[in-house]
Image (spheres, rainbow, N blue to C red):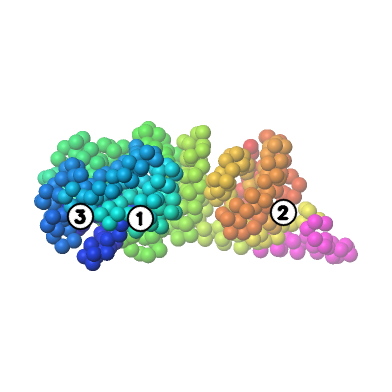
Amino acid sequence: MLFEDVVGQAHVTTTLRNALGEGRLAHAYLFSGPRGVGKTTTARLLAKVVNCLQPRGENPDNTCESCREITEGRSFDVLEIDGASNRGVDEIRNLRESVRYTPARGRYRVYIIDEVHMLTKEAFNALLKTLEEPPTHVLFIFATTEVQKVPPTILSRCQRFEFRRIPVAEITQNLRAIAAAEGITIDDDALGLIARRADGSLRDAQSLFDQVVSLCGRSVTAGQIVDALHMVDHELYFRVSEIVGRRDAAGAIAIVAELMTGGHDLREFLSGLLEHFRNLMIARQTGRADLIEASDHHRERYLKDASTFAMADLLRFQRFLSGTESALRWSSQPRFRLEADLVQLATMQSAPEVGELLGRLEELSRRGSVAQDVPRRASGARPPASRSENPAAPATPQAIREEEIVSRWGEYVAEVRKRRVSLGSLLEELRVVGVSGNQVRVVCENDYQVSAVTRNRDILSELFQAVFHTSARLQPVLVAPGSGSGGDAPGAAPVDHPVIAALKRELGAEPLDE
């Protein structure tokens, strides 16, 4: 193993090789990053090269006695310690005692502590003194997946390297080389499936590759991998976007039924669907597919299908599905929630049509306000001075669009749930029935819901601003169960209002039944 063999971490290996070449070796290093990206491998390489008896430039020769001992795990000069099982102060005190001894064969006594964040506070304190005044023959290499748990006093005494998630293309290339070396026939689509499933971890990808070969033999296809790893077929995501494009609500329900019959994880499917619409957005916006982690065949399809969607729609789909993904974690009936949201996604009006309709409705609203004000002026009546003097006055054009609030309500609920779980669960049961100025009316079916919304108005307004980027307050409207949509509640628009009439005429709107 050489530094050149470390996949996807050139920014780390290049810096380390330059430091070795110039003789500027630090006494402590911290390697942080996701699992399976090469932290421990790089630590062992560094331990080898500093103790190699016949180094080849800035690489170990891997043949000398010192290198063989390290490779086989029997070197007295390189000690690997698992921070999870040796996390106490006594173990670190023993380490402090051992650092006084000089190396048996090489130049350095190297301590590699994996998952160093698992050490206790007392253990870190015991380690700190040694890091402040380390012996010249000692080299510490710490590895962690949760660097935020390492005390700042330790971080400040280490040279830190952040390991990155490995791109799908580089994982695919590595797996292709392994397959060629072992005489295994596997196509690029199959390798891409394994690489994406590994989520940036080369170690996970190699483990999955071994699993697939064990199950499928020495000739592997993408279809076999989908079955072997129980993955959602990528073609299913393209079917969803086709269903959304033709507004096929029945097809959306059939997709969920297919997922349930196949025993797939709904959250995994939803995560993949979010990535799918993200890929369509990238292709639509840039006209290129190099930023999409997919096979060449699927990249070409993204470029082709992206032109069938407006950019605004793709953005709305992603925001909507983000809310669904958050809500699904807490839903007692995830299938029902996913069915409802996919149907809503499939029947959602396109952004340009909605914008045009809003303009027409605003114009109708203005005309209606003028028409209703003419009789008052003719009879000598004074027009109302403010909305507070005449609560039932026709609505004026709103800065907050009701349809946007409705479509992103799940996203808003998820944001509230992050702050207060119980409040987010309560909001999920409420329904938006109208917008007046900066007041968003929500239907409540009991006094408890009204009280909860009223008591938490400040935090609800704060989170509303964070999600919708505009200020508003939730106005609870108490309506008994089964009494309708709340349209006749105080402050609601009258049923003969010009805006209501336009909705009925333009969209065929009907009153909602509980």
1 on left or right of 167:
left
446 on left or right of 310:
right
Q: Which residues are magenta?
A: 363-389
Q: Which label was assigned to residue 316?
A: none
Q: Are marks 1 and 3 in contact (CB under 8 Å)?
A: no
Q: Are marks 2 and 3 in contact (CB under 8 Å)?
A: no
Which-is-in-front pick, marks 2 and 1?
1
What's under tag 2, amino acid-wise?
Answer: His
Q: Residue at x 11, y 48 (%)?
A: 65
Residue 512 rendering spot, x and y as whole percentages: 63, 42
Residue 474 rendering spot, x and y as whole percentages: 67, 49
Separation of residues labelled 1 and 3 (CA atoms): 18 Å
Q: Which one is in front, 160 or 431?
A: 160
What's under tag 1, amino acid-wise?
Answer: Glu
Q: Which one is in front, 245 or 20?
A: 20
Residue holding disc 2:
497
Which-is-in-front pick, marks 1 and 3?
1
What's under tag 3, amino acid-wise?
Answer: Arg
Disc 2 element? loop
Q: Is residue 386 magenta?
A: yes
In terms of sequence position, does the residue under pointer 2 or pointer 3 come before the other?
Answer: 3
Q: Which label was assigned to residue 133?
A: 1
In terms of sequence position, does the residue under pointer 2 or pointer 1 come before the other?
Answer: 1
Q: Is residue 164 magenta?
A: no
Residue holding disc 3:
107
Q: Residue at x 31, y 37 (%)?
A: 230
Q: Residue at x 80, y 64 (%)?
A: 374
Residue 372 rendering spot, x and y as whole percentages: 78, 60
